[in-house]
Amino acid sequence: MKTLRFGIEIETVGASRQKLAHAIQGAVGGRVSGDYQGWQVTDSQGRTWKVVPDGSLSGGEYSGEIVSPILTYQDLEALQQVVRATREAGARADATCGIHIHVDGSRFEPKGVTNLVKMVHKQERLLETALGVSAARLSRFCKPIDGAFLQRLEARRPRTMQEVNEAWYGRRNPTPARYDSSRYHGLNLNSLFFRGTIEFRYFNGSLHAGEVKSYVQLVLALAARALASKAASSKRRDFNPATAKYDFRVFLLHLGLIGEEFKTARLHLLKKLEGSAAWKGQRRDRRGSGGEEDGSPGSEGPQGAQGGAGGNTPTEALNAA
């Protein structure tokens, strides 16, 4: 997962695009320029960060979509600095905001794409719940994987990307449009055929640096698992809200998000789910409702995250301010 390249789009309200651009410059250096299409920051490495308008956002002139350049895993700290800087400049996320993460599609052949689609479909209800995706966004901007597409994909067992294309669109589409209606799915393959990236659109807007990092790590882990797997099952897993935290933790560990390095990611990705992270059924100890390793991080207020059960939640890890 650490060798995959990615990009991210972060939608914000509350600050003008010019102010966002100068905040980004403060985090990554370089120079700022602007025109009627938006603002650009050319960072100290010569890469371009963009701040562009988005008509779906509630803030009017005080809103903008931050579009990163191509990033690597080693750029995660710089990305977090950008998120912190824009928040300090007055930007925030409301219900109209989302985050879209793109993974470089150049390493994906038909098997890898098929594996990814099946993996996401199998866990999609759990993913949507863990990420707190609203019903409004699920019905419009990040719809679940289309059943007809999945049926075509499984029936055809594609061996070429053209066959994947035909399964996605229901026809051969050699010249897909950027705003093709098929793009509005949580897993967007129109982006793969239009610009060469696989887009994940499930994420609510956030200017919490730790959450943003956890979302990127989740996407990269999913992509890496799909590339490495010989095959995958698409059968939907049963969803039980009472055991969702345990079930999702097991899935995250299966993806390779194991150990101290990914502890903060697990905390953020599990915090919206019910149940225990450590036990499938009723807990057998008296330490409270938190998990054995990844307990509930509690609520994050202006002063940062509150402590978890049994003192197991590292407050510092959640205060990515």
Image (cartoon, grey):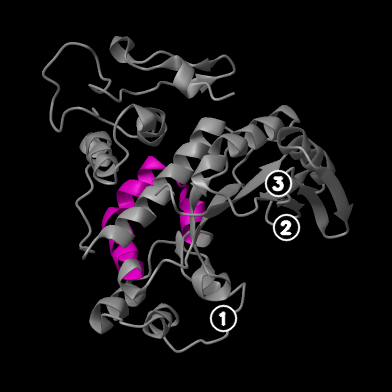
Where does label 2 land, which residue?
55
Magenta region, residue range: 113-139
| Residue positioned 57% across, 34% down in the render | 77
Give the SS element for disc 1.
loop
Name the residue type under label 3: Gln
Give the SS element for disc 3.
loop
Where does label 3 land, which residue?
45
Task: Specify the label residue 165 is tagged with.
Answer: none
Marks counted in the figure total 3
Disc 1/disc 3 C-alpha distance (Å): 32 Å
In the displayed structure image, the side of residue 25 where residue 277 appears, left or right: left
Where does label 1 land, which residue?
176
Name the residue type under label 2: Gly
Residue count near mark 1 (Cα–Cα under 10 Å), binned few <14, some 14–19, many ≥20 = some
| Residue positioned 56% across, 48% down in the render | 99
- Residue 14, percent from left and from top: 74, 37
| Residue positioned 77% across, 49% down in the render | 42
- What secondary structure prevails in the magenta region? helix
- Height in image: 142 above or below 293? below
Q: Is residue 271 visible?
A: no
Q: Nearer the viewer, residue 137 or 209?
A: 209
Q: Which of labels 2 and 1 is toward the front?
A: 1
